[in-house]
Image: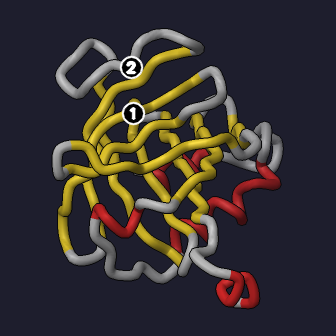
Amino acid sequence: MVWEVLSTLDSKSYGYNERKVVERLLTAKNYSLTPEDMIGFRRVRSIQLDARDGIFSYPYFSCRFKEIDGKVFFEKTTGSQRKSGYVYQNSPKSLVFLGGWSVNNDSQTSYGSNNSVAGMIYKIGPRKAIMIFPTTEERVEIYELLAYPKNSDELRI
């Protein structure tokens, strides 16, 4: 679906210069991961693709993955548009996100509510992952996630 939206954009589309960034994220090698591997990811930026309007990239905001009752829960903790929900194993190289979205300081919503959202998570580097949320036929959102290094040796990688 992301490729379909990208294919509709041309050099006159807003944010077209971000197209190569999006393509690199989508074509990056996928690594094995589990929900627990996502704990430690603390930064997220949204890249919104719209077939009519272009590519809209936002700066990094805070997020966290934490364990709640034996399940891994994700929440974007800053910024006006926030997603939150649980992460489940889908395959050795992908996770499923099931949650909801809210804005500003509204209460978090869950999967099954009017604000339901589902997505897929792929680990694309030692400290980088992406979440892909198809929102409509002509619109897709990508979260680019970054993890903090576990120790100073990882800073040199």
Percent x, y of residue 42: 58, 53
SS assignment at label 2: loop
Q: Depth check: give the residue in front, 43 or 151.
A: 151
Q: Is residue 88 left or right of residue 45?
A: left
Residue visible at 39% across and 40% down? 134
Q: Is residue 75 above or below residue 43?
A: above
Q: Is residue 117 above or below residue 106?
A: below
Q: Is residue 16 left or right of residue 96?
A: right
Label 1 and label 2: CA atoms lie apart by 7 Å
Q: Amino acid at mark 1?
A: Ser
Pointers 1 and 2 in contact (CB under 8 A)? yes
Q: Quadrant of the C terminus?
A: bottom right
Tell me which numbered mark, 1 or 2, is placed earlier along the sequence. Answer: 1
Percent x, y of residue 39: 42, 60
Check disc 1 and report the residue beneath it: 84
Percent x, y of residue 115: 33, 17
Percent x, y of residue 58: 73, 39
Q: Is residue 13 left or right of residue 90?
A: right
Check disc 2 and report the residue beneath it: 108
Q: Amino acid at mark 2?
A: Gln
SS assignment at label 1: strand
Q: Residues within 10 Å of mark 1 (few under 14, many from 20)?
A: many
Q: Residues within 10 Å of mark 2 (few under 14, many from 20)?
A: some
Displayed quadrant of residue 136:
top left
Residue visible at 42% across and 79% down? 30
Residue visible at 32% across and 44% down? 73
Q: Is residue 7 above or below residue 149?
A: above
Q: Depth check: give the residue in front, 2 or 31.
A: 31
Displayed quadrant of residue 156:
bottom right
Residue visible at 65% across and 85% down? 154
Q: Depth check: give the residue in front, 80 or 155.
A: 155
